[in-house]
Image: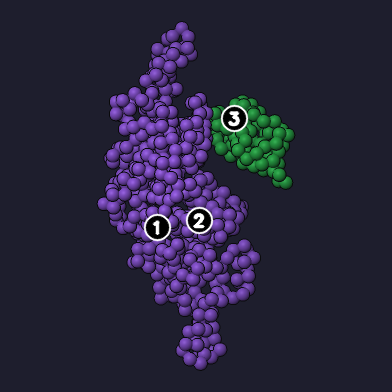
Chain colours: A purple, B green
Amino acid sequence: MSPKTPTDELEQRRLWAEAQGGPDNVKRQHDQGRLTVRERIAGLVDAGSFQEIGKLTGSESYEGLALKHVTPAPYVMGLAQIDGRPVAVGGEDFTVRGGTTAALDKRKGGQGGFVEDMAHHYRIPLVNLIDGAGGSVTSAKRRGHAVFPGVDSFDRSIDLLAEVPVVSAVLGSAAGGPAGRAILSHWSVMVKGSSEVFAAGPAVVERSLGQKVSKDELGGAAVAVDKAGSIDNVAESEAECFALIRRFLGYMPQNVWELPPVVPCDDPVDRCEDALLSIVPEQRRRAYDMRKLIALVVDKGSVFEIQPTFGKALITCLARLDGHPVGVIANNPMVYGGAMDGPAARKQVRFVELCDMFHIPLVFLVDVPGFMVGLQAEQTGVLRDGMRAVYVASQATVPVVTVVIRKCYGMAGMATCHKRGLEFRVAWPSAEWGSLPVEGGVAVAFRREIAGAPDPKKREQELEEELRAYGSPMRTAAAFGVEDMLDPRETRPYLCRFVALAQSRLKTELGPKLKSGVRP
Amino acid sequence: MAREEIQSEVTGTVWKIEMKVGDSISDGDTIMILESMKMEIPVISTEDGKLVEILVKEEQPVSEGQAVAVVETD
């Protein structure tokens, strides 16, 4: 081709960019059940809002002095809007050399790069659409030397975590750098059946350890989301993935210097659900559906659960009360009676930090018998993970309210309260607490007395009954050891009032939150 | 029609089996109750259909993620 005018040439170069890796490679991408990066961006952002930046980047080929073709750089990025709010968005173009890095004067994105600089400079959220394989040994041949790790620094990606919401979607096979980039996010998502994430893929694993595993076995959602918890949520399709990203960002402020957005709410603030009266079974041994309880309290349809399949003894969700975003942390009595194990503790730590960073008040709905006990829990470090949850709760400065639904015991119970703040705790009549549950506790504290009794089993039961009588939450309320008791039906109005009150406080603490100390 | 395995969410022991093979079942129905951490933990169907297999017995220990029943979905 030989363009007639400079404007024609510009137009031609843009057309080459839009053609991506050519029809064959685009077809191959589609045949894998995956969208191209341009289709992904179009599916994610408000219609027509994408302003591409760096569209002309690529490798040119000439015949003599005549430009023949430009193969676009394998990364597409720019500015766009989601629900009318600006975001920086970018992703690898897998149809061009498998989304590997390009030899440009500076990086467009993927690990630092201009798209991350824009998010930092304009203080807007960043969305990474990850579909790249990372470093390759072939680059050493091209450059003539091996590059030292960190030549493409993660520093910007790390700094962004204290500034603006960062979301990563893993949409292909991410190994190495792109996998690492996915983890450096406030929230991440992958697509079931069509994306994987791992430190290294099956070929490297087989060579290193002799293990033969498929991509899906090694880094599919069943591992990365359900077991490892390295990616937060899973979507059934790319379209659902984009809907989830839009939803997540809807709870987030644009940056840490702003408050999260408030939406109009048509769910009455004074909605008092009778179902809350009977949701906690009278029999203390019976579990119940904590998700149902949450849904009865928060604004209808406002629950967005984070990590629903990891650390299942705990439920963490973003939700709204009278239109204001809140972070709800609830124990799940259906899984180990809600006891905090390592994964549940790690999930709580991450979620508390997320909400604290973005000025989202925290609501704890507590039913925790303590840290998880047993050989496996001890071997996997429940004490360190659990105490980290206590540490992080202590460092948070966002307003917290604690609603004790049933059990609140031990150090896991401490991790649900904000002692350094107002230490505002209210309880349902079904509540009970202590340093450890009466069962088990009696056996330890009265060991000699029980062993010496004519009928040890009977004596243990008598002691348990005697101590349980002191366990009424009303007694503690009378001593102002808990600030108030609620009729369960009053929970929604009470919490809506709390979150409205929190707004004045939140405004005084805008900006980054710098924390010192070594976390346990 | 598809066979869907129902898994235990927890490690514990089977306390009471509440349904029998051949029963029709709906999403949310309790198939059996396990005991774990001194709590009664129901195993709840996530499918609509027919209970075609129960893979455990009362008092048998089960581990997290273990298939305990099979439902044939409508």
Density class for disc 3 (Cα within 10 Å; few <14, some 14-19, many ≥20) is many
* Closer to us: A391 or B31: B31
Quadrant of the snapshot with the N terminus of chain A: bottom right
Res A246 visible: yes
Read off the chain for label 1.
Answer: A
Q: Position of residue A349 (x, y in %)?
A: 39, 45
Q: Which residue is mark 3?
A: B33
Q: Give how far apart the Cα atoms at labels 2 and 3 are.
A: 34 Å
Read off the chain for label 3.
Answer: B
Residue located 34% across and 51% down the image? A359
- Up the image or down, A295 lies above or below A51; here it is above
Residue located 62% across and 26% down the image? B16
Q: Secondary structure at mark 2?
A: helix
Q: Secondary structure at mark 3?
A: strand
Residue located 34% across and 23% down the image? A475
Q: Position of residue A190 (x, y in %)?
A: 53, 56
Q: Place residue A441 in its image quadrant.
A: top left
- Up the image or down, A304 lies above or below A432; here it is below
Density class for disc 2 (Cα within 10 Å; few <14, some 14-19, many ≥20) is some
Q: Position of residue A358 (x, y in %)?
A: 36, 53
Q: Which residue is mark 1?
A: A165
Q: Give how far apart the Cα atoms at labels 2 and 1 are.
A: 14 Å
Res A195 visible: no
Read off the chain for label 2.
Answer: A
Residue type at tag 2: Leu
Density class for disc 1 (Cα within 10 Å; few <14, some 14-19, many ≥20) is many
Residue A244, disc: 2
